[in-house]
């Protein structure tokens, strides 16, 4: 088989092959749950966003208290009086079992170059249990003075 034939075979295989990482029905439900919660957060709807959380919700972001009440207590006052935002679909979503990892692209101001931006990528990991978000991790750190 020459190079052209090999390239054509590879292209056909790519087009006709089944997805390598097809989600199970449960994994798709977990993904949909996380995206629905993210949409509610973008809309700044604390009641709706918290409705997706398990009663024993564990929060690993050091700025947000753990638990459903901690979530509401942190975001409720923060979002009060703010206009709903626009949900920007994640750049990537990776699902494995009860874990859903989301990558979002966020433009940030370029230091020392007013009016310019650069792209930063942020990651959140969620654990889903019994149809609710049970745990959340992200890269947030406490601000330094």
Image (tube, rainbow, N blue to C red):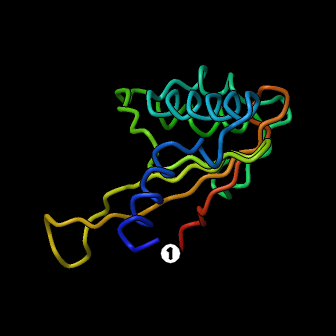
From the viewer's side, name the closer residue of 71 and 41: 41
Indicate the quadrant where residue 82 lies. Answer: top left
Residue 85 is situated, as x and y percent measured from the top left of the image, at 36, 32
**Tag 1: Cα neighbours inside 10 Å, few (<14), some, or many (≥20)?**
few
Residue occupying image coordinates x 57% and y 36%: 75
Horizontal side of 39 relative to 21 (left or right) equals: left
Residue 101 is situated, as x and y percent measured from the top left of the image, at 63, 50
Find disc 1 in the rendering and name its residue. 145
Residue 123 is situated, as x and y percent measured from the top left of the image, at 56, 57
Residue 29 shows in this picture: yes
From the viewer's side, name the closer residue of 121 and 85: 121
From the viewer's side, name the closer residue of 67 and 127: 127
Residue occupying image coordinates x 20% and y 79%: 112
Horizontal side of 8 relative to 127 (left or right) equals: left
Residue 137 is situated, as x and y percent measured from the top left of the image, at 69, 54
Q: Tell me the element at label 1.
A: loop
> How many marks do you count on the picture?
1
From the viewer's side, name the closer residue of 25 and 35: 25
Residue occupying image coordinates x 57% and y 49%: 102
Indicate the quadrant where residue 76 lies. Answer: top right
Residue furthest to the left in view is: 115
């Amino acid at each position: 088989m020459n190079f052209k034939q090999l390239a054509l075979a590879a292209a056909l295989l790519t087009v006709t092959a089944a997805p390598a990482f097809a989600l199970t029905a449960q994994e798709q439900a977990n993904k949909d749950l996380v995206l629905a919660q993210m949409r509610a957060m973008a809309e700044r709807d604390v009641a709706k966003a918290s409705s997706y959380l398990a009663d024993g919700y564990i929060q690993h972001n050091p700025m947000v208290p753990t638990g459903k009440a901690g979530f509401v207590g942190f975001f409720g006052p923060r979002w009060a009086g703010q206009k709903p935002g626009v949900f920007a679909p994640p750049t990537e979503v990776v699902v494995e079992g009860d874990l859903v990892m989301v990558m979002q692209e966020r433009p940030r101001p370029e230091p020392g170059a007013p009016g310019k931006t650069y792209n930063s990528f942020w990651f959140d990991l969620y654990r889903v249990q019994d149809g609710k978000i049970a745990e959340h991790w992200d890269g947030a750190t406490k601000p330094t003075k």
